Image (spheres, grey):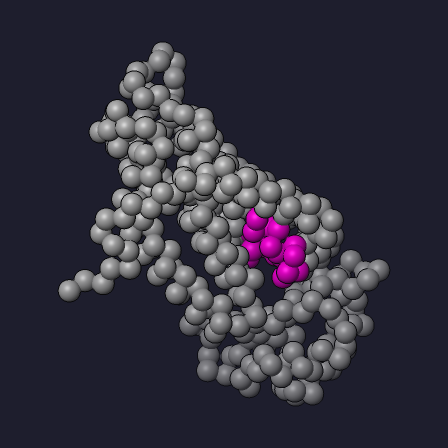
Amino acid sequence: MRLRLVPQETRIDFFRYAPYTFGASVIAVIAALLIWALVGLNFGIDFLGGTTIRTQSPNAVDVGAYRQAIQPLGLGDVTITQIFDPSFAADHNVASLKIQAQPGEESAASGMITKVEAALAGVDPDIRFTSVESVGPEVSGELIRTAFLAVGLAVCAILFYIWLRFEWQFAVGAVAALIHDVVLTIGVFSITQIRFDLAVIAAILTIVGYSINDTVVIFDRLRENLRKYKKMELREVMNLSVNETLSRTVMTSGTTLIALIALLVLGGDVIRGFVFAITWGVVVGTYSSVYVAKNVVLYLGVDREGKKPSGGAGTQFADIDA
């Protein structure tokens, strides 16, 4: 007896309201861009600059007590994490504190570091600072440029891959879906003002990979069905392809969301931004695979004659395996 979340055969008309779903996606992207421009992002220490302090103590690390002791100092964005390493001895307890740059300073002032040390000494008299590293605004600005460049290059590489594997219309649809996912993710972070740091950039790159994987699965089935049902209308073939892969999509997204929601609830503050980004990305990525990527292909149309035009890279490499 096997569990089925989706019936073996479904006949859902995904493209019945194609103009409305695609229009809603365009409006959402424009709104996200406007909010991003007007409100901005709550950049973390990685992008604003600040100081990283590494502590060591023979006593166990109490992140909550550390945070409570530092809170009265009014340092703004402070991230505290315990560091685990198999090579550490039993009495080798290490923690990392990231403090945002203070107003008028490139990093936390030396006097402020002394206050932090005194505050933590009240919690653990044996604590000592083993290293203090500062990140200035110039380095932070370079990190912002590099992070967004990484996302842009990833999208361009995917565009090239889809263009070789399928028709150019498929490549345009896939990249439109990726841009939709990335922009909406940044827009949500702008609305919620959740801390935006390098971990979130890593999450966005993960979203790009997850979204394109789901899109390519449906594209593969669509290409097979286009060859199989040459007389059927493009819209009907696309509906058939999405329905045939629906069970796989629901199972993959569903099981992924179960793990992500558990991490979101129980994972703590340190990874909350990263997990939230991926959770949101799984939802919008699943949506965009059908209602953005496939709608773009539906509007652009595809070559139903199976001809291979000279110099057309989109078809001459169409049978390359992933």
Residue lying farthest to the top in this orientation: 310
Magenta stretch: dominant secondary structure: helix
Nearer to us in this view, 27 or 146: 27
Residue 193 among those drawn in magenta: yes
Residue lying farthest to the right in this orientation: 104
Report the residue at 35% width, 13% height from top.
309
Instruction: Give the percent coordinates (x, y) of residue 273.
Output: 56, 62
Split into 4 quadrants, where in the image is the C terminus?
top left
Instruction: Give the percent coordinates (x, y) of residue 221.
Output: 28, 37
Residue 152 occupies quadrant: top right
Residue 320 occupies quadrant: top left
Vertical comparison of 306 with 27: above or below: above
In the shown orientation, is residue 302 left or right of residue 181? left
Residue 131 among those drawn in magenta: no
In the shown orientation, is residue 217 left or right of residue 1? right
Instruction: Give the percent coordinates (x, y) of residue 277.
Output: 53, 57
Report the residue at 44% width, 64% height from top.
260
User: Is residue 96 visible to the viewer in this orientation of the structure?
Assistant: yes
Report the residue at 34% width, 54% height from top.
250
Split into 4 quadrants, where in the image is the N terminus?
bottom left
Vertical comparison of 108 with 212: above or below: below
Instruction: Give the percent coordinates (x, y) of residue 101.
Output: 75, 62
Residue lying farthest to the front in this orientation: 16
Point out the stretch of residues depicted in magenta: 183-201
User: Is residue 171 visible to the viewer in this orientation of the structure?
Assistant: no
Residue lying farthest to the left in this orientation: 1
Nearer to us in this view, 208 or 111: 208
Nearer to us in this view, 281 or 320: 281
Report the residue at 38% width, 20% height from top.
313
Vertical comparison of 247 with 176: above or below: below
